[in-house]
């Protein structure tokens, strides 16, 4: 597998792709499929796991010779599997310290990352071609970052030996395609591989240029057209991408590549296989035992509301370590958390009396706010565009959907709290920070911390995931695993994993305005049914769902890989 992220390596995770690359090899091993993973080191990953140098070699990229190190470490979870790293001496892969992706600029989007990943693909192709890596039976490429490998293996005469190796392609997020110019830029196909571009026939070039920007190469399209099979990470998303996008109507579909995907579908080479979640039954048993302890008034620091407050404080302080001043949004969050601590101490003599009987262990599991709403995800329009829509309230006030939710929460539950954990777009962060300053029941944590995310899953009452589109989504699975009901947009993998009025709440809408209105209506339903018998049954059913990797891995093996 070629991938940009890998959750089995510390600090190598940014998004959901990393979870798949971490969990899928372990699920494939019982199916007698050994999946090695190769990824960039980014200047720090290989050293962080004490990887051993396997070989050194040189490649010509962008007109200059590059010295490359190939390093290896045993897979931490799969006996016999290996994780390889590609490291470049001149820092092309490292970017900012400890950073996987570069922010780039609006004027030249993906420029630095496109250079990085085109070089990565060249290095992998060279390592296999020179027999520095074992010859694989199949190569599995993930998202646009690794797609240029298919271009080299299929169209570059220097890698004819690789053309017979089947390549399959997984699309984790079709909206991010890594588009770059063909020529006249330091981050372009002609800059990376000048002789290759000149030798491409008109027919070959027609399969890899962007259908909207004919002067650009589209790595996502490369993967779709040059790989034997294409895989989307949920069945519903595999259907959605066959329809052109209509952003004004709030629909995100094929993103300009629907015609290519439809051709794959027509030939039987397009698959929708749902990603999955790891379920540790021992951990589940521990969680049940914890609920019983809490129902008896026995505090358990790690999984309690107090533990969540401590984790949030700790994360915020760590985020300040390399900053000359405290960011405004972080100061607001620290102030809000301090207020919650004061509330805890004022009520410390009475909070145990508020616990529910032992037959309702899931209620008030966090021993904190009367209702805790949570959300974990990147700050992108994909995730929060609907929350940012403006709606007109009955009093004539025009506010964002998020503000309307906070007002409704405050009215129904004066001690309720909404905690949102995420980082990404700076403009969205500023907008959410301003809302956090004006609403005492909203805590915005502008960053990501795994321990905080886990604690939010365990302590929350309602998990919100109002994505405009969602190829699969892992957060809703993790929330449901912890017994948290989800309120989600009925698209993609969210629709495939959350059953309306059974394990959660779905909203729909054929326009952005309609989606905003539907979300607010469903949140009103949530407030009306919270802690009812229906709610408790939904909590239990949500926690019993199993989207396990064993079933998905079998589909990978048989349908995507074509192994008997």
Image: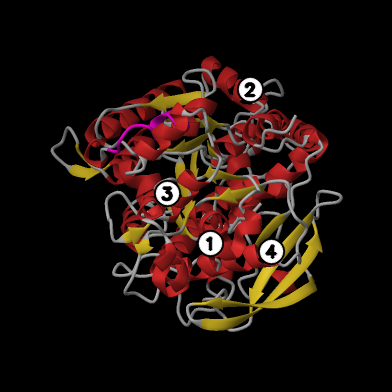
Residue 561: % across, % down? 66, 37
Report helix, strand or loop for mark 2. Answer: helix
Query: In this image, 481 relative to 228: left or right?
Result: right
How crowded pointer 4 is (Cα within 10 Å; few <14, some 14-19, many 20+) is rated as some
Q: Which residue is mark 1?
A: 156
Q: Residue at x 46, y 66 (%)?
A: 196
> Going from the N terminus, do you reach mark 2 or mark 4 first?
4
> Going from the N terminus, do you reach mark 3 or mark 4 first?
4
| 239 in magenta | yes
> Going from the N terminus, do you reach mark 3 or mark 1 first?
1
Q: Is residue 552 above or below residue 430?
A: above
Query: In this image, 43 relative to 515: left or right?
Result: right
Q: Which residue is mark 3?
A: 221
Q: Main secondary structure of the magenta part?
A: loop
Mark-to-mark CA distance, 4 and 1: 12 Å
Residue 157 found in image quarter:
bottom right
Residue 221: % across, % down? 42, 49
Q: Is residue 495 above or below residue 100?
A: above
Q: Which residue is mark 2?
A: 540
Report helix, strand or loop for mark 3. Answer: helix
Q: Residue at x 32, y 26 (%)?
A: 521
Q: Which residues are magenta?
A: 238-245
Q: Which residue is mark 4?
A: 129
Residue 441: % across, % down? 41, 47
> Going from the N terminus, do you reach mark 4 or mark 1 first?
4
| 94 in magenta | no
Nearer to the camera, 156 or 295:
156
Residue most toward the left? 396
Mark-to-mark CA distance, 3 and 4: 24 Å
Nearer to the camera, 516 or 264:
264
> Going from the N terminus, do you reach mark 3 or mark 2 first?
3
């Amino acid at each position: 597998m070629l991938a940009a992220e890998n959750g089995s390596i510390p600090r190598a995770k940014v998004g959901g792709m990393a979870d798949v690359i971490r969990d899928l090899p372990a699920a494939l091993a019982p199916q007698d499929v050994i999946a090695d993973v190769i990824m960039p080191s980014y200047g720090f990953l290989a050293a962080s796991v004490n990887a051993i140098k396997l070989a050194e070699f040189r490649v010509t990229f962008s007109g200059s010779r590059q010295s490359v190190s190939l390093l290896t470490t045993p897979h931490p979870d799969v006996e016999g599997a290996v994780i390889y790293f590609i490291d470049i001496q001149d820092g092309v892969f490292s970017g900012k310290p400890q950073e996987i992706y570069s922010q780039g600029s609006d004027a030249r989007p993906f420029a630095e990352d496109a250079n990085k990943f085109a070089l990565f693909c060249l290095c992998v192709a060279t390592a296999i071609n020179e027999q520095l890596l074992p010859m694989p039976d199949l190569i599995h490429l993930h998202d646009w970052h690794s797609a240029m490998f298919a271009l080299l293996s299929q169209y570059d005469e220097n890698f004819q030996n690789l053309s017979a190796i089947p390549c399959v392609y997984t699309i984790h997020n079709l909206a991010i395609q890594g588009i770059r110019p063909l020529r006249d830029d330091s981050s372009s196909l002609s800059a990376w591989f000048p002789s290759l571009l000149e030798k491409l026939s008109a027919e070959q070039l027609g399969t890899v240029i962007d259908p909207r920007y004919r002067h650009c190469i589209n790595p996502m399209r490369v993967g779709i057209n040059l790989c034997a099979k294409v895989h989307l990470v949920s069945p519903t998303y595999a259907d959605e991408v066959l329809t052109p996008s209509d952003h004004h109507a709030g629909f995100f579909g094929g993103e300009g590549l629907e015609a290519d995907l439809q051709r794959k579908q027509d030939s039987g080479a397009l698959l929708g296989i749902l990603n999955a979640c790891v379920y540790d039954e021992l951990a589940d048993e521990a969680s049940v035992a914890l609920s019983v302890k809490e129902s008896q008034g026995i505090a358990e620091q790690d999984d309690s509301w107090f533990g969540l407050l401590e984790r949030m404080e700790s994360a915020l302080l760590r985020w300040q370590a390399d900053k000359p001043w405290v960011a405004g949004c972080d100061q607001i969050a620290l102030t809000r958390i301090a207020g919650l601590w004061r509330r805890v101490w004022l009520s410390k003599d009475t909070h145990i009396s508020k616990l529910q009987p032992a037959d309702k262990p899931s209620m008030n599991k966090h021993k904190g706010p009367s209702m805790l709403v949570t959300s974990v995800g990147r700050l992108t329009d994909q995730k929060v565009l609907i929350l940012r829509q403006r709606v007109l309230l009955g009093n004539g006030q025009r506010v964002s959907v998020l503000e309307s939710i906070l007002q409704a929460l405050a009215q129904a539950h004066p001690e309720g709290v909404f905690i949102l954990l995420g980082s990404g777009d700076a403009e969205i962060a500023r907008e959410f920070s301003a809302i956090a300053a004006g609403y005492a029941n909203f805590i915005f944590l502008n960053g990501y911390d795994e321990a905080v995310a886990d604690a939010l899953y365990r302590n929350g009452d309602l998990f919100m995931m109002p994505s405009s589109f969602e190829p699969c989504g892992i957060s809703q699975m993790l929330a449901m695993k912890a017994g948290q009901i989800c309120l989600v947009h009925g698209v993609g993998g969210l629709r495939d994993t959350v059953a309306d009025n059974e394990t959660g709440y779905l909203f729909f809408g054929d326009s952005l305005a309609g989606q905003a209105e539907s979300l607010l209506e469903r949140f009103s339903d949530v407030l009306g049914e919270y802690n009812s018998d229906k709610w408790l049954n939904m909590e239990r059913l949500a926690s019993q769902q199993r989207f396990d990797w064993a079933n998905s891995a079998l589909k990978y093996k048989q349908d995507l890989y074509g192994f008997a």
